Amino acid sequence: MPRKPAFQDDRVADDSSLATELSAFTPKSGTQAKELPIQDLDRLARQHGFLDRSPPVEPKRRRGRRKTLGEVKFFNIRAPINVFDRFVALCDNEQATYWEMLEQLMNKAGVDQNGNFND
């Protein structure tokens, strides 16, 4: 008796019987897809674990650095996040580099070239 190939199984129907079964299939009539608002579709997608694949929103780009006049030294400080964020926002709003804003603030505070307050 010839041996059956390993992939052939008696439980799997042959192609002709599958085609016969599928030809008898007819979809229900009168059913149409409902039009849902995009917000509902997004909510349903998130509930079922689908990820948003739209491109991320690009953060606001900051201007490039300006050239300084003369020699430079590095100035590094630690500051609370809220103070740092306020300073960066101020620089962005005034379109000034950090050193330019530091200089403007010292001038407004009346600090002279020796680091003393002008009285």
Image: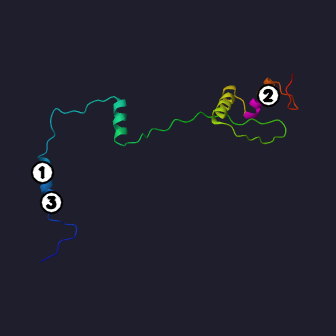
Residue drawn at 41 percent across, 42 percent down = 51
Discs 2/1, front: 2
Label 1 residue SS: helix
Disc 1 residue type?
Glu
- Which residues lie in the magenta part? 98-102
Circles 3, 1 touching at the beta carbon (< 8 Å): no
Quarter of the image holding residue 101?
top right
C-alpha span from label 2 to label 1: 86 Å
Q: Image quadrant for the C terminus?
A: top right
Q: Residue placed at 13% from the left, 56% from the top?
A: 16
Q: Is residue 112 magenta?
A: no
Q: Residue at x 66, y 32 (%)?
A: 83
Label 3 neighbourhood size at 10 Å, few (<14), some (14-19), many (20+)? few
Residue 81 drawn above or below residue 110: below
**Distance between the alpha carbons at the discs numbered 3 and 2:** 88 Å
List the single residue furthest toward the bottom: 1
Q: Which residue is mark 1?
A: 21
Identity, as a three-letter code, of the amino acid under mark 3:
Asp
Left or right for 19, reference 108 = left
Instruction: Residue 56: give x, y in percent of width and height.
Output: 50, 38
Q: Which residue is mark 2?
A: 106
Disc number placed over residue 5 in the picture, else none: none
Q: Residue furthest right?
A: 114
Q: Secondary structure at mark 2?
A: helix
